[in-house]
Image (cartoon, helix red, strand yellow):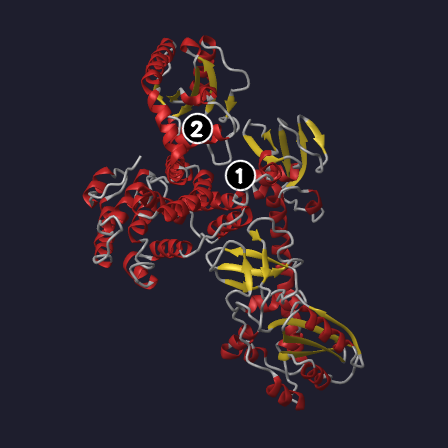
Amino acid sequence: MNKDNPNITIEDIINEINYLNEGEITRLKDAYEYAKKVHSNQKRLTGDDYITHLLNVVHILVSLNADIDTLVAGMLHDTINIGGVEKEVIKDKFGSEVALLVSGITQINNLKYNGTNETAIANHRKILVGLTKDVRVLFIKLADRLHNMRTIYMLSDAKKKENAKETLEILTPIAHRLGINKIKSELEDLSLRYLKPDVYFSIVERLNKSKNERNKFVEEMMEDVSSLLNEHRIKHEIKGRAKSIYSIYKKLDKGKRFSDIYDLLALRVFVDTIPDCYQAMGLVHSKYRPVPKRFKDYIAMPKNNMYQSLHTTVFGPEGNFFEIQIRTYEMDEIAERGIASHWSYKEQGKNLMKGMEEKLQFFRSIMEIDENSEEIDTKMEDLKDTIYVYTPKGDVIELPNGSTPIDFAYRVHSKVGDSMVGAIVNEQIVPLDYILQDNDVIKINTNKTSTPSKSWLDIAYTNQAKNKIRAYFNKIDKAEYLKKGEEILTKEFRKKKISASDMLSGDNLDKILNDLHLANINDLYINIGSGKISVSHVINTDDDKSEVLLNKVIKDNNDTEHKGDIIVEGIDDIKVKRAKCCTPVPGDEIVGYIQTGIGINIHKSNCPNVANIKERLINVRWNDIIDKKYSTNIMVYTNAKKDLILDIVSITQNNNLTLKSINNIKIDGKYSFELKVSVPNLEALNKYINALSTIEGVTGVERIIK
């Protein structure tokens, strides 16, 4: 079980690597020398030099065929957290990719786990994955934890159990979702060993007692199956497969008897092609009677973590149950290494990372699922309740039940969806709101000049299709808004006899963009054209007594959150910041959105910016004890012909609130005011809004979302 190698050297690792070029080997050696220098005075609890841990982590990553940036980052993964090296130093010495990975592993290693219930566990897992910008960070994290678990025997019993619990609840589900079976199984067995040592060693003892007998049956079965396949000239390889201790424990824990576990005797057959898989399975079933309901075809219908194989259980020699798995060599690579198996050294750069990021996005979407929860059936509904439909060429497309031809078209390609004019299902014309069924064959009719309809948003079922439809119209709308905004601003400049070239160039343009939190002049035009920003925000020529008063009452804007004001269950220390769009205050119902690589943005629960998001949201709540004020945005509408700033300032001061900024917007001779005000809670805010409503000429007051 314990595969720790305290005597491993960099030469041992390099001798095992057969997929890196000389330049990449040199980079790995340089990283080793640097890490050895940084950690030169550090020891592990085992008494070994710290560098042995880093070498073992890299050795594990090599077993996954990790790329050179991941190997270098694995060697350097503790240089920031433990070695005290700055990220910029890593970037200068080893490049931005490596620095990003090392920074990422440092960030998630700093998360403090204190899971006491299912919600806390699920939150921690979601946050860990949500913060990960690059999926390779998770490989390093798993390799790091695997070696630590191999050497956990040096810790106290309490600490062993704590680490084992976190590993089992947080990290093994991640390894499972990534499909890395070789790491998942070892982590599970090690966790069980330290969480429930009596149970663990009891299973080991029972396995050892029956080992000789089981080996005899397995060897006999291997010979019989091999002879059968040779007779039919199917090239193959057969191995006996050991059942993991943890998987046996899970079955025993559900009430099964040791003798009732079907796959204690198991074979794995490797062949070259998919047709060989099915032919081999047919031959096995022709000789050995299959156990009813034990056949699984994961080739035609792969698992969510990309696993493919044929599974069957048959009655073998002397009536023993044998589980037999049949797969291609490529399928076995995926089964053992999961997403990591898609590292291809013939593909480089963008193609590889695009594929990896797509897998990570899907992975994030399913990490909310807690396999041990009593609500697993409902939480898995979106994943399990799937249909399999076909293109006219016979390609299989997996979709959630409830999907329409629109969802199918966009799953095939965005261009197919955007140019779709109709659908034919099983050689019959169907409406676009037709609900697809299992095994439907779908042909999408397209026209290069056709475009999507906004009504499709009400018909499409999947978020993927809806997002692509929205993206199309956002692109069209932006072009229209940009043109409209430029025309409005140009017209206003002429009206006020202002030089557009002077106003929108150099430092003056930079100031306008900074004040409005915009990236460039096109963003300015788009926001004006869409009505989000008034021209008066850009052209402000008023200079009266109100400006002098405002300079006295508007305070410095400092919105940094105090630690602990917002609580994320199960996480002790993570960066939390209120969203600028809806600016929630204590008393508002709130929800957390995990922002990749940064932290958690807090939105009002009814904020439209998170209304259609299902993934990467977590439950958060306000602390019961908060002694600070929070800024929020208010719009005051009036039918008054006079400036009401003095009245607004007076009411603000009477309510003991802080006015942080005020913009007066004059449209058709009437005033409206956009306020940014600091309040302690929702109750005080509502009281303030009611007070503003009493001002003569005010027609309405509301909180605004930007």
Give the residue pinned by disc 1.
372
Q: Which mark is residue 248?
A: 2
- Residue 547, how many percent across, how many down? 63, 87
Q: Amino acid at mark 2?
A: Ile
Residue 407 visible in image: yes
- Residue 208, how many percent across, how many down? 33, 24
Residue closest to the eye, 478 or 121: 121
Residue 160 lies, with reference to residue 622, above or below; the image says: above
Say which quadrant the C terminus sits in: bottom right
Residue, x 37% and y 49% (percent of image)?
159
How far apart, in angstroms, are the residues tagged by discs 1 and 2?
A: 16 Å
Crowd class of label 1 (few under 14; some 14 to 19; many from 20; radius 10 Å):
few
Residue 542 lies, with reference to residue 587, above or below; the image says: below
Q: Is residue 113 left or right of residue 150?
A: right
- Residue 18, how many percent across, how many down? 25, 37
Q: Amino acid at mark 1?
A: Asn
| Secondary structure state at the residue bearing disc 1 | loop
- Residue 550, how many percent across, how many down? 63, 85
Residue closest to the eye, 72 or 439: 72
Say which quadrant the N terminus sits in: top left
